Image (spheres, grey):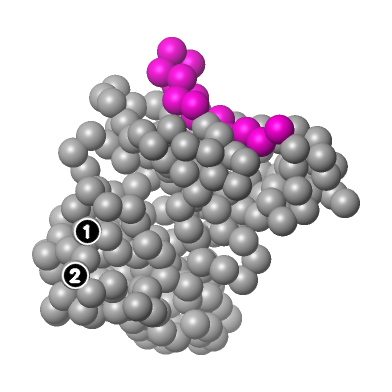
């Protein structure tokens, strides 16, 4: 079975401070990992995926297979980053996503 | 493209009543997903379809929940009878094989 764990339900940081949203997973195969974001009054949308190895809105996430983690990081938080963030896992060969419980990030001006 | 469309956006009902949530996936997508979002449990996959066929309904809480996809452009999630603990935001999402998943705006259900 697979599991996605986001240990922090709430996270507050000051504007300009670094931010890290934690995500750990358990899965015996080779997963595909994603971060989804839900801004206020907007739809849940894909932020980034590990296979793309990209930086979106200043955010990056590196898949660490040894630690089974996929933490989301940004060096300097902005007020517009305040949102709900979900880490998600897709099993090899599957199309459905398994989500963590989410972390609500608040960036304090 | 309007994206995934869900209706109604808000639903308030009384315990024991039947509730039907509707979803129109993005045209051309062959996967459709129903998720439930709560504060305590986050986003839970209830059921998903591939080419209108239910593939995995292991996330459906109990027999009070049922989902159908009569054609490629429409799906329903029905709760009968509804209970207060069913109060949540229900999301429909769609994708095509290998593509990213697109979510609808959600239906906020309140069962009194």
In contact (CB < 8 Å): disc 1 and disc 2:
yes
Please provide percent x and percent y for residue B54: 16, 62
Please provide percent x and percent y for residue A16: 82, 40
Determine the image quadrant of residue A60: top right
Tag of residue B34: none
Please provide percent x and percent y for residue B72: 16, 75
Judged from the image, the secondary structure of the residue bearing numbered disc 1 is loop
Task: Examine the rendering and report whether any part of residue B101 can be seen.
Answer: yes
The chain under label 2 reads: B
The chain under label 1 reads: B
Residue B97 covered by magenta stretch: no
Identify whether B47 is placed above or below A31. Answer: below
Residue pointed to by mark 1: B96
User: What predominant SS class does the magenta segment belong to?
Assistant: loop
Identify whether B53 is placed above or below A33. Answer: below
Which of A74/B90 is in front? A74
The total number of labels drawn is 2
Residue pointed to by mark 2: B28
Q: How many C-alpha atoms fall within 10 Å of the one at disc 1: few (<14), some, or many (≥20)?
A: some
Specify whether B32 is left or right of A81: left
Identify whether A2 is placed above or below B71. Answer: above
Q: What residue sits 47% from the left and 44% below the top?
A: A48
Which of A23/A80 is in front? A80
Kindly report the distance in space between the C-alpha atoms of the residues bearing marks 1 and 2.
7 Å
Q: What residue sits 75% from the left and 48% below the top?
A: A78
Please provide percent x and percent y for residue B69: 18, 74
Determine the image quadrant of residue B81: bottom left
Q: Bounds of the magenta span?
A: A62-75
Specify whether B30 is left or right of A66: left
Residue A68 covered by magenta stretch: yes
- The residue most toward the top is A66
Specify whether B107 is left or right of B34: right
């Amino acid at each position: 079975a697979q599991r996605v764990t986001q240990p922090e339900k709430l996270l507050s940081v000051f504007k300009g401070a670094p931010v890290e949203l934690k995500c750990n997973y358990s899965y015996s195969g080779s997963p595909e990992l994603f971060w989804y974001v839900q801004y206020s009054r907007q739809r849940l949308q894909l932020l980034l995926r590990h296979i793309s190895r990209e930086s979106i809105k200043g955010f990056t996430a590196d898949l660490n297979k040894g630690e089974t983690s996929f933490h989301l990081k940004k060096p300097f938080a902005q007020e517009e980053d305040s949102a709900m963030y979900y880490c998600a896992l897709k099993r090899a060969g599957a199309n459905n996503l398994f989500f963590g419980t989410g972390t609500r990030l608040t960036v304090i001006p | 493209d309007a994206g995934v469309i869900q209706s109604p956006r808000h639903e308030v009902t009384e315990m024991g009543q039947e509730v039907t949530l509707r979803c129109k996936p993005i045209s051309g997508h062959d996967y459709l997903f129903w998720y439930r979002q709560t504060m305590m449990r986050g986003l839970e996959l209830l059921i998903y379809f591939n080419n209108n066929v239910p593939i995995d309904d292991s996330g459906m809480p109990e027999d009070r929940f049922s989902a159908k996809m009569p054609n490629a452009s429409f799906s329903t999630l029905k709760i009968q009878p509804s209970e207060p603990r069913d109060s949540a935001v229900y999301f429909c999402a769609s994708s095509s094989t290998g593509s990213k998943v697109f979510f609808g705006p959600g239906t906020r259900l309140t069962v009194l």
